[in-house]
Each structure stands twice: as C-alpha cells, then as structure tokens.
Amino acid sequence: MAATQHAQLIKQDSRDYLTTALLQLLETHDLATITVTQVVKRAGVSRMAFYRNFTTLSDVLTAYFDSLIAARFADVQQQLPVADKLMAISGFFSTQAAVLKLSVERGFEAIIRQCFDQQMLHFYADLVLPTTLTTAQRQYWMKFMSAGVYAIWREWLFNGQREPLTEIHDLIGGFQTATLQALTVGTDGV
C-alpha cells in the first residue's frame, strides 16, 4: 500500500512539473511551436514520465484547466451564500485573467473553452428544467448558455473587470431566465 501511495505521489509530482514547465514555456512561445522535448527538459523529467501521464501537450493543459475550472464549479454548486460564491468566482477569474489573455496570444484558448463548456454542461444537466422541453431543446439551450456565459466572462476579463461582479452575475442570471422562458413559451404553443 505504501509503495502504491509513493508511486502515485511521484506520478503527481511529474504531472505538476510538466504542467509548470509547459505554462512557463507558453509565456514566450506559442503552443504549436513547443515540443515535448522542451517541456521534459524544463521539467527535469524523462520523456517516459511525460508519456506515462499524457499523450499530447494539449492533454497537459486540459488536465490542468479542467481541474481548476471544476473546482470553481464545485464552489458555485455548494450551498453557500451568493456573496461567498461570487468571491470564489471573482478570485478565480482575477487570478486567471493573465492566463486567459495568454491563451489567446499563444493559441490555447480553445482548450480552456472546452474545459469550461464541459463543466457548464454538467452544471446545467443537474438543473431541473421544464418537462415541456424536448431533449434537443434542452441540449441546444445548454450549449447556448455555455457559449454565452463564457463570452460574458471573457469580455469582462479583457475589459479590465470594470463592472462589479454582482452586475455580471445578475446579467448572466437574467439571460438564463429570459432564454429559458422564451423557450418554454415556444413549447407551450403560446
């Protein structure tokens, strides 16, 4: 048992070193120009360690961002006061603003967007939606909301977070409610 735990710790350390190395390289290089050799050299691990953990460099970023974004969604889904949830989200977006901007410059924003989309779909799948919605309507609405929420957060970050977070939260909530109401009115034949 102890040997297994030790092996898992070593594996996690390798993953952390590889992630840190790739993020450091992305500060000055586009993702498309970085090689596995550069990452393992900077991380101080072997190529074998890389391939034991990942298949591609995109997999490194996916694992990293999926974990970060999933943790924020877990914060949102907790039974906490709205102010606490907003603080958790604000802290996340404030600390990740530079990385999101870098992702646009260095060609890996699609990875962040994909991780965000997956978490949004899980989040919305847990919502109790009107039974009058068809499976297709439900799926399209969730995709529509995911794209819109991401676009709002992205715009807010890139514009220097000028509006209060509560205003952004209310805006997203309003869009969610309005689009769902419009969709249900359409299914009720009204």
Image: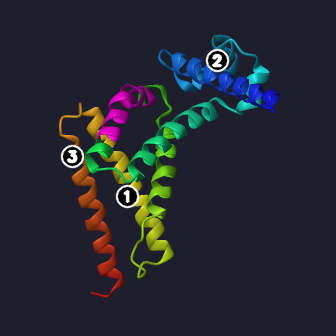
User: Which residue type does callout 1 highlight?
Assistant: Met
The residue at 65%/26% (across/down) is 15
Q: Earlier in the sequence, mark 1 or mark 3?
A: 1
Q: Is residue 101 magenta?
A: yes
Q: Which residue is mark 2?
A: 39
Secondary structure at badge 2 equals: helix
Cα–Cα span, label 1 and label 3:
18 Å
State the image coordinates of residue 142 (x, y, percent, origin top left).
Answer: 43, 62
Q: Are marks 1 and 3 in contact (CB under 8 Å)?
A: no
> Label 3 belongs to which residue?
166
For image coordinates 35% across by 30% down, the residue present is 97
Mark 3 element type? helix
Query: For the residues marked 2 and 3, what is the alpha-carbon distance in whole angstroms?
Result: 40 Å
Under mark 3, the amino acid is: Thr
Q: Is label 1 in a helix, a strand or a loop?
A: helix
Q: Are marks 2 and 3 in contact (CB under 8 Å)?
A: no
